[in-house]
Amino acid sequence: MKVAVFSTKPYDRQFFITANYDHEHELVFLEPRLSRETALLAKGFSAVCVFVNDQLDAHVLEILAAHGTRLIALRCAGFNNVDLKATAKLGMTIVRVPAYSPHAVAEHTIGLILTLNRKIHRAYNRVREGNFSLDGLLGFDLHDRTIGIVGTGKIGQIVAQIMQGFGCRILAYDVHPNPACEAVGARYVELAKLLTDADVITLHCPLTPDTHHLINQNAIAQMKKGVMLVNTSRGALIDTKAVIQGLKSQKLGSLALDVYEQESDLFFEDLSNQIIQDDLFERLLTFPNVLITAHQAFFTKEALQNIAETTLSNISEYQQGKECVNQVNLEQAIAPK
Ligand code: NAD
């Protein structure tokens, strides 16, 4: 099948070319992000392959459909960037990679918690400059602390398992509780209770209309003073302005992000020679107790291999007219599970 692969990076090319030996699709790698301005690049391609920050609103989808695209192959789990109603209207099929390595994201989450708590990022810079002072590097024992996990699907469950190993109390909140989490000692509570009791709150639910700005001024007001907040799920789960206020008032003790609401203008590119125009993002960077990575939680060899293999299998199944288990439908957007 002829596939336009948008937002291609060298690592995507490497893993997709290797995985394609078994599929023999005609892959054309395009560096630009899919948007209204670039949609015409897909003219004549029956499939497009896209990532988290490609834009698939109704307008873009109409352009794609008008020029022959029938299949949208997401090479990620989340599909919050796709207007599913528009795809249904246009008769397009959407496939995704529901699980490529929940371990990758869970392990990165733990890495952020440990780094932020023990200030390893600051210690690294200090020691390299011959500054061996410990002032400002004080952390806390995770043992006996309460971890609140919002969203206990594949990733949240692994975070629960790992944090249980640290000797933490685990509070969980999910619209569909997961027995595997209870089996490792997690206790399901209402969101309000989790927000009130947790020392560390980590977000692992999808971005939906229900979870948009789940962490807002009101949620922050309910949290313990000094709480650590971690988001490796989707940027818009957090109201950035409210979080900045929370950091300024010191209600939030620290913040780790792998995702950011306006990340599509920033992440995955080298902007080190440019003037960043996003003042909220720049404000976040000024806090010593904020740690940001640029949507890299998924970025392991295993995950990239699984992403490429599953995406190409999804495309092959579509081409062969087979039912694809990884097809996204409109109902999932309303009640994701
Ligand atoms: P999953 O579908 O296995 O789990 C999501 C869980 O969230 C489910 O248990 C679901 O019931 C729950 N949920 C849905 N709505 C909720 C709500 N309103 N309140 C509380 N819980 C709710 O998904 P997963 O594989 O664990 O991934 C979780 C999220 O992580 C994805 O949606 C994606 O946005 C994000 N993600 C980020 C990266 C990264 O690199 N940073 C990589 C992969 C996935």
Image (cartoon, rainbow, N blue to C red):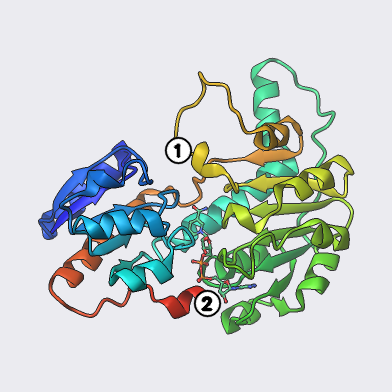
Residue highlighted by disc 2: 334
Residue type highlighted by circle 1: Phe
Residue highlighted by disc 1: 268
Q: Residue at x 35, y 46 (%)?
A: 34
Sequence-wise, the earlier of marks 1 and 2 is: 1
- The label on residue 322 is none
In the rendered image, the vertical position of residue 159 relative to residue 284, given as above or below: below
Residue 107 position by quadrant: bottom right
Mark yes or no: residue 336 visible: no
What distance separates the C-alpha of mark 1 from that of mark 2? 29 Å
Check the picture and name the quadrant holding the N terminus.
bottom left
Q: Are marks 1 and 2 in contact (CB under 8 Å)?
A: no
Q: Give 83 or 161, whichever is nearer the viewer.
A: 83
In the rendered image, the vertical position of residue 153 relative to residue 278, given as above or below: below
Residue 97 position by quadrant: bottom left
Q: Give 160 or 240, whichever is nearer the viewer.
A: 240
Q: Residue at x 38, y 46 (%)?
A: 35
Mark yes or no: residue 315 visible: yes
Side of 183 relative to 168 (left or right): left
Side of 300 relative to 314 (left or right): right
Q: Residue at x 67, y 46 (%)?
A: 256
Ligand 1 quadrant in view: bottom right
Q: Position of residue 253 (x, y in %)?
A: 82, 46
Q: Position of residue 96 (x, y in %)?
A: 35, 65
Q: Mark 1 or 2, which is nearer the eye?
A: 2
Q: Position of residue 164 (x, y in %)?
A: 67, 67
Question: Is the residue marked 1 within 8 Å of ligand 1, measured from its CB?
Answer: no
Q: Position of residue 294 (x, y in %)?
A: 53, 41
In the rendered image, the vertical position of residue 119 relative to residue 271, given as above or below: below
